Amino acid sequence: MTSDDLIRPRLVLVTTPLTDADAEERMRAALSGGDVASVLIDAAGRDAAEFQRLAETLVPLAQAAGAAAIVVDDSRVAGRSRADGLHLTGGDIEALGDAVSRHQPKLIVGGSGFTSRHGALEAGERMPDYILFGRFAGDTEAEPHKKNLALAEWWAQIVEVPCIVMGGAELSTLEVAAATRAEFVALSRAVFGDGVDPAAAVAQANSTFDAVFERMSQ
């Protein structure tokens, strides 16, 4: 891979830590902090009606900021909230392929839960819009999981389908995820965790992406 092939990673936000009470305020703050490519809206234990209300709150906020709003694991909520996409977390290759055939190109379709190279490649053959390496609510440590980093770095070198790598719980470790050359890095606790200023976190993440891209381009 030459320097001409390098792509500055972009930020994906995962809503898992948000509560119903603070979701709108904290998402507005995050989106005000700088470039966000997409927002993955996760039910995080909510029932269907609660998830519908959350999606109807967050989808227009994301879209107004120029970010794709992607609903996790519920095609009906995605449709009713007029989301831009659907993300499947189950690591089910056939379900992913079915979602691609049913919903593309009207919706962005992506998936996660593929924890081996073989499984990821099989999923990629279904031609989703992206594959995510990592697990929602799995960012319990400061650093990203090493296996996710290794899969993203390998994938980014050989597969044209874009990938997202799940970052860690602290922004201080973001460079490690950005250095995989994944097209996107997802952050959840690092932006929406307790005591974190979402706007400042998004601004810092983008500054880190700029610095990593500049360094790797030299």
Image (cartoon, rainbow, N blue to C red):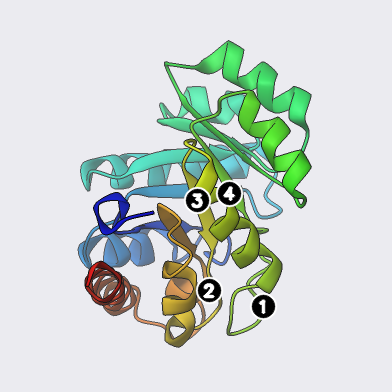
Q: Quadrant of residue 214?
A: bottom left
Disc 2 from disc 4: Cα separation: 17 Å
**Mark 4 secondary-structure assignment:** strand
- Amino acid carrying label 3: it is Gln
User: Which residue is denoted by mark 1 in the rendering?
Assistant: 140
User: Which residue is denoted by mark 4 in the rendering?
Assistant: 132
Disc 1 from disc 2: Cα separation: 8 Å
Task: Looking at the picture, tell me which residue is in the foreground, 68 or 2.
Answer: 2
Q: Residue at x 34, y 80 (%)?
A: 197
Whether the residues at callouts 2 and 4 have beta carbons within 8 Å, the answer is: no
- Tell me if 38 is positioned left or right of 218 in this view: right
Q: Can residue 155 be seen from the camera position used here?
A: yes
Q: Of callouts 2 and 4, which one flags the residue occurring earlier in the amino acid sequence? A: 4
Pick out the residue farthest to the top: 102
Neighbour tally class for label 2: few under 14, some 14-19, many 20 plus, Cα within 10 Å: many
- Amino acid carrying label 4: it is Leu
User: Which residue is denoted by mark 3 in the rendering?
Assistant: 157
Q: Of callouts 1 and 2, which one flags the residue occurring earlier in the amino acid sequence? A: 1
Disc 4 from disc 1: Cα separation: 17 Å
